[in-house]
Image (tube, rainbow, N blue to C red):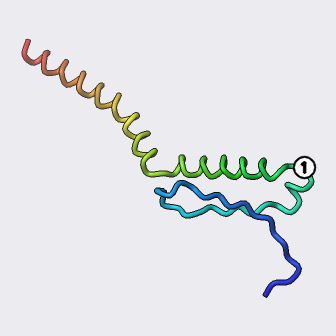
Amino acid sequence: MVKGVTRRVVVVRPEPDGIFEQAIFIVKSSGAAKDGRSPDDLLREACRVAAGCSGSRGGHSRLMRMLRLAAPAAAGGAAVGAAWLLSTLV
């Protein structure tokens, strides 16, 4: 049992089809009260942070980023291959 400790938390529940059930943010005891932020401000900030984390480390977005980088390289390789093929035939 813990006595004398009070924490403010913000719980963000993502869409039901996601892999996470909820994200829990513990609010700094010196931060929100002194800044005068409303509960809506805290929730918006928590959602922004949660969205930033899921987008940057998700497998799907990483795959899409790799495909966007690989497509020009593959096109360049195909162009060089076509130029080599034409030069050997001529």
Q: Quadrant of the C terminus?
A: top left
Q: Residue furthest top?
A: 90
86 shown above or below 8 = above
Where in the figure is residue 3, as x and y percent of width and height? 86, 83
Q: Quadrant of residue 70?
A: top left
67 shown above or below 50 = above
* Residue type at tag 1: Gly
Residue under pointer 1: 36
Where in the figure is residue 36, as x and y percent of width and height? 90, 49
Which residue is pictured at 70% across the width and 52% down the height? 46
51 shown above or below 23 = above
* Towards the viewer: 90 or 58: 58
Where in the figure is residue 54, as x and y percent of width and height? 55, 51
Instruction: Name the secondary structure under disc 1.
Output: loop
13 shown above or below 45 = below
Say whether residue 76 is left or right of residue 38: left
Where in the figure is residue 69, as x and y percent of width and height? 40, 34
Q: Quadrant of residue 83?
A: top left
